[in-house]
Amino acid sequence: IIFASSSSIYGGADSLPTSETEQKNPKSPYAWQKSAIEDYAKICADLYDLDITCLRYFNVFGPGQYGDSPYSTAVSAWCHAIKNDKECRSDGDGEQTRDMCYVDNVVDANIKAANFFEKINGECYNIACGDKVSNNEILEWLRQKYGSRVKVRHAPERPGDVKHTQANVSKAHTQFGYEPKVRFWEGLEKTIKWWGLDE
């Protein structure tokens, strides 16, 4: 069993890049339920010998992800806004950073973990790139590319929103050979192409 967990279980991690040994500190109901299911997966692995792997995804984005939901990632929300002549909402000071993980990396991690020949027994693994980029950097790149089409509306910082995320992915690499193949800026180009923003 592959469980889709989340980097949100760390809350605001004290150390960056964050490894799986970092204490969990969920800051939202969403993060708490991911953390609880990880704990349950470990119990089931120990009691019933179930082979369960928990993959902690970091800020997944890419083609096919729509941007008209309150739960959309910044990338998909901003692409949706540019496409539909709406404002790009920026929370807080925009200096928050994220380890943005292109969807192909997540798919590859799932396949590698599922095909791993040894039992993983409820262990957790970070799935990301090990990089970080700020919201301001992304918005500035979009401004350079699309000019006046990018209209930014500043909003208050959201409660429970962590300031920085960045993953240490060495455990997944060592265990089952995970390697991020698509870095953020390449993934952003691919995502923009899917949205048809240059058409």
Image: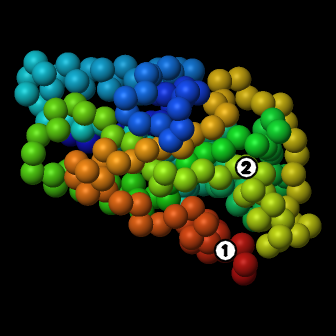
- Taking the spot 17% from the left edge, 38% from the top edge, the residue there is 120
Q: Amino acid at mark 2?
A: Asn
Helix, strand or loop under label 1: loop
Q: Quadrant of the N terminus?
A: top left
Pointer 1: residues within 10 angstroms few (<14), some, or many (20+)? few
Pointer 2: residues within 10 angstroms few (<14), some, or many (20+)? some
The reply to whether residue 23 is visible in this rendering is: yes
From mark 1 to mark 2, how far is it between C-alphas? 21 Å
> Going by the image, does 130 lie left or right of 96?
left
Q: Amino acid at mark 1?
A: Gly
Residue 91 pos. (x, y %): 78, 38
- Taking the spot 16% from the left edge, 55% from the top edge, the residue there is 115
> Going by the image, does 129 lie left or right of 199?
left
Helix, strand or loop under label 2: helix
Which residue corresponds to mark 2?
135
- Taking the spot 43% from the left edge, 44% from the top edge, the residue there is 168
Which residue corresponds to mark 1?
196
Color theme of the render: rainbow
> Going by the image, does 93 lie left or right of 25?
right
In this rendering, is residue 170 above or below 107?
A: above
The reply to whether residue 85 is visible in this rendering is: no
Residue occupying the far bottom of the picture: 199
